[in-house]
Image (cartoon, rainbow, N blue to C red):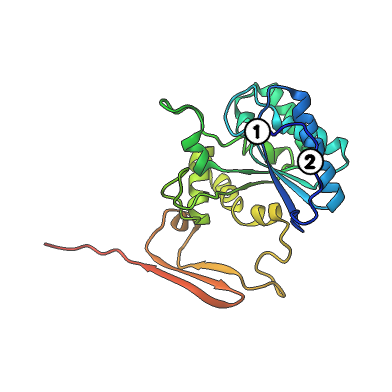
Amino acid sequence: MGSGHPGPSCPDRCPSASMTSGAHPVSDPALHRAHLDQLFALAAEFDVDLDLHADMDEDPSRRALELIAERTLAHGRRGRVNAVHCCALAAYPDDLARRVIDQVARAGIQICICPIGNLQLVGGDVTPRGRGSSRPKELPAAGVNVAAGTDNLHDTWFRFGNLDPVETSRITCLAAGLRTDQEVLDGFAMVTGRAAAYMGLGGYGIAPGNDADLVMFSADNLDDVMRGAPGTRTTLKRGRVVAHRETTARLVRS
């Protein structure tokens, strides 16, 4: 995180819906806590939520998520804070991880994991170690909403990124070890219903009165969607077709 020096109020710069900040580690926990307290004070002043990037490596000495949960409760901001990455949680001993997860649940913090970027960035420059996917099974079991996302569009962090939620879900299943039918459904929910809840979107889903914002696949099952089987994919925005793609496969006899 940044320095512990107090900064000015930001009425002209503060977003109306949320405020995002990195939570990079510092050597002095007191500075870490002071910086968070500044963020929480600003969030309270402008009545906005916080979305914090934390613990972006699987280093068990990184404890930003735990401190974020502590300060969330201390400032009475339960349910107003999200945390992104949270990779170090996977490296904690199980008893410590359970304690932190329980605290996160009490604070009403939602988690967004980012497997696409973290698979490349976590674990060292030469020998890749770890999956960078936090604890996507234990967190929901404790009542914590977990979404999956990426901000990597053909960039330095992931040159193949295309912001496709289906790809994000597929790589999430791979990185997080989601294998059973229910786990794959959970992995898909991380980019659909759970992601909508994370973002605080109202009127999400197929129901009377909701906007017709959806993607339709000509597939028999979710496995075919996830593996990119031949067929059509149509994107609607408020009921209007805005994109369409069709793939085919055929045998060519020589």
> In this image, 176 relative to 42: left or right?
left
Quarter location, residue 113: top right
> In this image, 31 relative to 179: left or right?
right
Secondary structure of the residue carrying tag 1 is loop
Instruction: Judge whether 79 appears above or below 138 on screen.
Output: below
- Crowdedness of circle 2 by 10 Å Cα count: few (<14), some, many (20+)? few
Q: Could you tell me if residue 212 is visible in this image?
A: yes
> In this image, 106 relative to 61: left or right?
right
Q: Could you tell me if residue 78 is visible in this image?
A: no
Task: Point out residue 29 in the picture as x, y percentages from the top left corner.
Answer: 75, 24
Please count the marks in the image: 2
Task: Point out residue 143 in the picture as x, y percentages from the top left corner.
Answer: 74, 42
Q: Residue 24 carries which label?
A: 1
Secondary structure of the residue carrying tag 2 is loop
User: Which is more toward the observer, 175 or 237?
Assistant: 237
- Crowdedness of circle 1 by 10 Å Cα count: few (<14), some, many (20+)? some
Quarter location, residue 62: top right
Q: Quarter of the image containing the N terminus?
A: top right
Residue projecting furthest to the bottom: 240
The type of residue carrying mark 2 is Gly
Task: Point out residue 115 in the picture as x, y percentages from the top left corner.
Answer: 53, 41
Residue under the point 86% across and 49% down: 45
> In this image, 57 relative to 106: left or right?
left
Instruction: Judge whether 162 appears above or below 90 on screen.
Output: below
Query: Disc 2 marks which residue?
Result: 7
Distance, label 1 to label 2, CA atoms, is: 17 Å
Instruction: Judge whether 104 appears above or below 92 on screen.
Output: below
Q: Residue 109 carries which label?
A: none
Task: Point out residue 213 in the picture as x, y percentages from the top left corner.
Answer: 61, 70
Residue under the point 64% across and 35% down: 86
Q: Quarter of the image containing the C terminus?
A: bottom left
